[in-house]
Amino acid sequence: MKSKNQTESESGIILLAKKYGKTSFSSLSSVKHALGTGKVGHTGTLDSFADGLLVVLSGRLTRLVPHITNFDKKYVALIEFGEKTDTLDPTGNVIKSGGRIPTESELRAAISSFVGEIEQVPPLFSALHVDGKRASDLARTGKEAELPARKITIFDIKLLDFKGKYALVEVHCSKGTYIRALARDIAKKCGTFAHLYALRRTKVGPFELSDAVGYSELDDFTIDSLLVHPRTFSFGKSGENDNTEKKDTKNNEVNFEAEHAEIRANLKQMTFSLAEYCGLHPVLLSSHFVESFSNGKPLNSRVFSGFFKNVGKSEVEDDAELAVFYPKGKFAGIVVKNGDKFSYGFVIPPNKDFTIFTWEQVVNGEFSSEFKNAGTAITIGSFDGPHIGHDALFDSALSQRTKNLVPGIVTFTKSLRALKNPAVYPGDISSLAQKLEILAAKGFSFAIVIDFSPEFAKIEGTEFLKKLIDLCGMKHLSEGKDFHCGYNGSTDMQQIADFSIRSNFTLQTIDSVMYEERKVSSSRIRDCILNADFHPVEAMLEHPFVLDCSGFDWKWNSVKIENSENSENHEKTELVAKKIGIQILPPDGSYKVSVIMSVFGSPKNQNCRKSGEVQSTVSVRAYRSDCMLENGIIRLSFSNKLIGGFVRAVRFDCPD
């Protein structure tokens, strides 16, 4: 039995290849068992006689079923002319036979006439309701029922093959299209009758059947294959094909454990592009508002402008459903925007399963035995200010989940450059807390944090890697082509490649990433910050430069400002602190910044607290401020006298 947190983490999208003879509902059983959750739903029924793509949503993503149900679809259908069944498909009783077979030219002319927006009368044997009763139930009792025509769109029809009385067609259509009814109407246009012999769904919106779990087990869908291996149906009370079930049970053909492992490995997540395809507007959540968002703190226009970044292809409209993503792209939930008012649709809590180990714990045998036994996929580096150059490394290690390896990071308390030249080193881009927060949000399961000591510096590179193999179960390593490690950096990638072959772990070498025709690196970002050039900083970090103010001792001042024009005095609030910690500071000067503050209760009753103090009840707010930097002293000026709480961070926004 999975814990609640584990079940929450299994929210996602599964592409499943349904086999013929099974209902859409029963096909979900394998997904439920694989993910350990009963919260599963498909986004469009396939009849029992049909096979093909089912798009399945699990966990909290089941709330998005209506959005994906609206996607257009593609089918390949085999039509048998000259024979009609009461259900218009192979499961029904033959009620008419001996009809004429159209010529190929007649058929091509007929199908072309159905392209575009048309009106279609659904089959009587369908799940639609007439006077509160299912049409199929009425049909089985012999009663006639009139179903009104409905508007649908046929985007394209192609005749793939035509042999004897069988035609294989590909149909691209809108939601609500009945392929059985289309076969009926095509035959009528040709002056005859027909029924659907077989059906396969090949595409739903952007999702392809070829990417689905179980696709390789489907038979070829051609006229020759379907006639040589005819599909027989003997449906029991459950709607299942009894013949198929008996075959699976008797011969034990289904390896359930392998299927479940494949489902877990292919659990897809919501993406920016898919959100837009669903008609949602993607926005990125600031790391400073993650806790408040996941706890359902109130939303308003100020919160939205301060903590949400538009990542869609168009501006956010007044009335919109927003797909919210955590930093580094994990789907967080839905927010509904109605003018200046915001409300939660649903929230997927952030993954809390991120474990931090020290090197001492690893050496002392305190690394997770669960991770070690499963095997780990690791990438090693300072990762100062995780940036777009690191993303390929991260993706490489994270992708090893498909091989059931546990992805993790080996990093350091501060940049190695700070240890080599502390007197001239200007500072790190991110604090250790910021770095670990980003890595956790990215989806890593653990981090090993090394406080680079003189003793550690003496370890040879291959000896260090051997410890990761022996103590952490490392089976995969992802590194950049310029990576080196060990005493004085003497072990390069060629030596590591040779060692990987001898030690039986896989190694993936990642190329450098370019931005504006130059290599992306922490050193380059650091230089941009020192030059107050924040546009490339934001592009390479994928977020603005943020100064972590944990531990800063802020002094609260009220400053009077004289207005020479009308002799009136005004007050402004000023916060002053000396910068501490390992992070870099931009050059002395004046900046427009956003100040991220934790506020307790009503702001007017606040006193300034030392940054980082833990309180029981907190909300997070962003305030615009003027910032003056001078010799390591930070001065923040506010016109709003009601601000209060403690300063969590200062975000240096790009100038307009």
Image: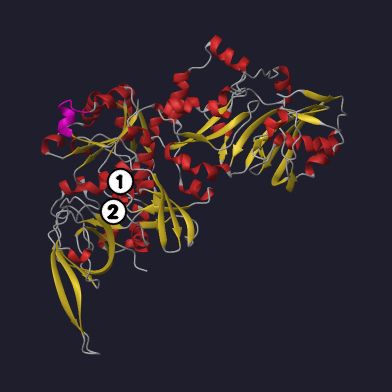
- Closer to the camera: disc 2 or disc 1? 2
Q: Is residue 587 visible?
A: no
- Secondary-structure class at tag 2: helix
Q: Which residue is mark 1?
A: 438
Residue 13 horizontal/vertical position (percent):
47, 37
Determine whether, in the image, residue 103 is placed left or right of residue 197: right
Residue 288 is marked as: 2
* Quarter of the rendering containing residue 579: bottom left
Residue 236 horizontal/vertical position (percent):
62, 18
Q: Amino acid at mark 1?
A: Ile
**Which quadrant holds the N terminus?**
top left
Frontmost residue, 388 versus 125: 125
Residue 654 horizontal/vertical position (percent):
34, 64
- Residue sitting at x 57%, y 22%: 217
Determine whether, in the image, residue 45 is placed left or right of residue 471: right
Frontmost residue, 77 versus 337: 337
- Secondary-structure class at tag 1: helix
Q: Per the image, is 364 magenta? A: yes
- Residue 299 sits above or below residue 200 on the image: below
Frontmost residue, 166 versus 132: 132
Q: Amino acid at mark 2?
A: His
Q: Mark 2 and mark 1: span between their CA atoms? A: 11 Å
Q: Per the image, is 222 magenta? A: no
- Residue 53 sits above or below residue 390 on the image: above
Determine whether, in the image, residue 274 is placed left or right of residue 518: right
Q: Is residue 586 visible?
A: yes
The mark nearer the N terminus, 2 or 1, is: 2
* Quarter of the rendering containing residue 11: top left
Residue 642 is marked as: none
* Segment tinted magenta in the rendering: 359-367
Determine whether, in the image, residue 532 is placed left or right of residue 180: left
